[in-house]
Amino acid sequence: MPRWGMVIDLNKCTGCGACVVACKTELNVAIVGPEESGKGRTMLCMDIFTFYEGEFPNVKTRHMPRPCFHCDNPPCTKVCPVRATYRNEEGLVTQIYPQCIGCRYCQVACPYTVKFFNWSKPEWPKEMRKALNPDVSVRPDGVVEKCTFCVHRLQKAREQVAVENRELEEGDYVPACVEICPTGAMYFGDLDNAKHAVNKLKRSHRAFQVMEDLGTEPKVYYLSEMEIE
Amino acid sequence: MADSHQTFFEDEELIRPIEQTGPGFYATVVVLLCVIAFAGYTYVRQVIYGLGVTGLAQPVSWGFYIINFVFFIGISHAGTLISAILRLSKAEWRRPITRMAEVITAIVLAIGGLHPILDLGRPDRMLHLFTDGRLQSPLLWDVTSITAYFAASTVYLYIPMIPDIAILRDRGIKPRWLYQFLSWGWQGTDHQKRVLERAINILMVMVIPIAVSVHTVISYIFAMTIQPGWHSTIFGPYFVVGAIFSGIAALLIVMIAFRKAFHLENYLKEIHFKYLSTLLLIMSILWFYFTFSEYLTAYYGHEPNEMRVILYKFFGAISPYFWLMGVCNFIIPLVILANPKTRTIPGILIASISVVIGMWLERLIIVVPSLANPRLPYPTGVYIPTLTEWSLFAGGIAVFILGYLVFAKLFPLISIWEIQEGRDHSIAEVTDRLTTYLPDQPLRKL
């Protein structure tokens, strides 16, 4: 059974935000206006942290894309009272939107604050309504959402592979953020499969997980930034 | 309405509020119904437009509803637990207090237990809790223990009320069918009395562990996560102590209010307030001890994420409420109640109100700061409740007052038969009991 995971090379990340945009359109994440956004209700499955170092004019910025870490030991799925969020056998932490009662306990329990809530009915500008991804359901208000590692793409890839009568290979299933990344900073694949790039990269001496000391065993690894002389 | 041929009845004062209703009652009810109607309107609006009408957002996604849930359930520990402990320890002064306490529990528990539903994004899917409930989730533990507590405490309220309902039935007070039905054929025979006593004895023992479990489990909602400020082993007992603390304060407020409104000075004497306020003082000191241990361990450990939450509480945007909590929960009750000169009924009232406010602030201080300071470098969260949350809070309090008033108009707030029993039997019983406490006297020559 594959264990899907991601590696993000911070050396290559330019902080362009393409992954954020790709994610938002791929997963039909609702758009909230500036007013709601100012209240802290922006909905993002993929976010980018920007760290500023030093004082003007010697300022340095660092960027860090942040999807859901799809922990192997997720604190969020433990507390769900209705089985609306769970970790499937391939390690993906998924959310069943029609099952979610909107208690937000998973959101509160996540140490990485990656889950978010539909505070109001989702709305899209008229021009964008026909651009919604037909493979992904549009969520109603009152449920918790999260990054799914584009699990619908996995289903599609499985069907494609079955038609072509071959095994699932690296590159058949890639989330939208990884696909779009213009600098190739993001890698995706089976962490346990030696043929996949992520398997090798996660063992790099630069590799780290965010807050590994919590014991959540995230399946997103980062390759730390190195100074280039 | 009392019939002229009625024989002399000593505790006439306890039944008078049921037989006579003044205009003040109706005026209060109308005001309360207005508050409740407005709360209903804001709730319907919230269901239609989503939780966006509240002040909740990322990362503070739990706010007033969860705070009030913990607060109301805390108040509910007034009743049953205190009355059960006093009954169990054979404290004779409990007699006029127990029922007033138990009524608080039954009403507040119903209000508090419904609060998580206000908080749900999809209340229409609430039944998933029963059809697909995961017993691994602390929320399910809550559902289980709160329903158990509600069942136990309503039965514990009702059973000792049967002889009093029979008194009302025999006096022919309307609605007769209600008292006829609820008195369950009570005739006061010896057999019935024995069964009643036995039932009360079983219930009071059973209700104590259930009551303790309820607030422990509520603390587990927070303590079971790994969030800084919540993941603490003392949360269970800390919450139970806080619950009993706020419960006693609420009970004292209710007692003082009804003593004044129903002229119960003859029944609720100063001694009752003195004893209960001593309990309140002890709980205040105990609360301080728990709070001190909780913060000292976290502060001394100096773990960065814990420190961020602690510094936010001590000096951050929420710090005025934090320090006010300390003043309300510890300093004011300590100053007022430790001094015999200020330990009068008005003084006790001030201390109790201060404790209820302080305990509400404590729930705020527990829920919000941990959420406002996520571990990853997000900006610190801001939570400003909107009119929706305030009106639902006011609605909750109004439902409580209305429920209590309606109860007081239907049933005697002070157990008549227990007072009579105290008068008829207890003096002899206590004297007998006292002699058994004393060392056996060697036979003296007369």
Image: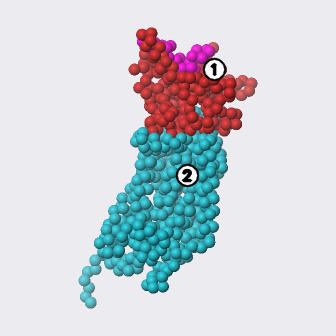
Chain colours: A red, B cyan
Q: Give the image location of residue B14, x and y in percent.
A: 49, 75
How dense is the environment of label 2, judged by Cα within 10 Å: few (below 14), some, or many (20 and up)? many
Q: Is residue B26 left or right of residue A1?
A: right
Highlighted range, magenta: A166-188
The correct choice, above or below, for B372 with respect to B341 in the image is: above
How dense is the environment of label 1, judged by Cα within 10 Å: few (below 14), some, or many (20 and up)? some
Name the one closer to the observer, B368 or B137.
B137
Name the one closer to the observer, B57 or B222.
B57
What number is the disc on residue A18? Answer: 1
Amino acid on which disc 2 is placed:
Asn
Q: Quadrant of residue B138?
A: top left
Name the one closer to the observer, A217 or B211.
B211
What number is the disc on residue B68? Answer: 2
The correct choice, above or below, for A164 with respect to A107 in the image is: above
Magenta stretch: residue A178 in it?
A: yes
Amino acid on which disc 1 is placed:
Ala
Are discs 2 and 1 less than 8 Å apart at CB?
Answer: no
> How far is the residue under mark 2 from the one under mark 1?
42 Å
Q: Give the image location of residue A143, x and y in percent.
A: 54, 36
Q: Quadrant of the C terminus of chain B?
A: bottom left
Q: Is residue B336 left or right of residue A199?
A: right
Q: Is residue B391 visible?
A: yes
Q: Secondary structure at mark 2?
A: helix
**Chain at tag 2:** B
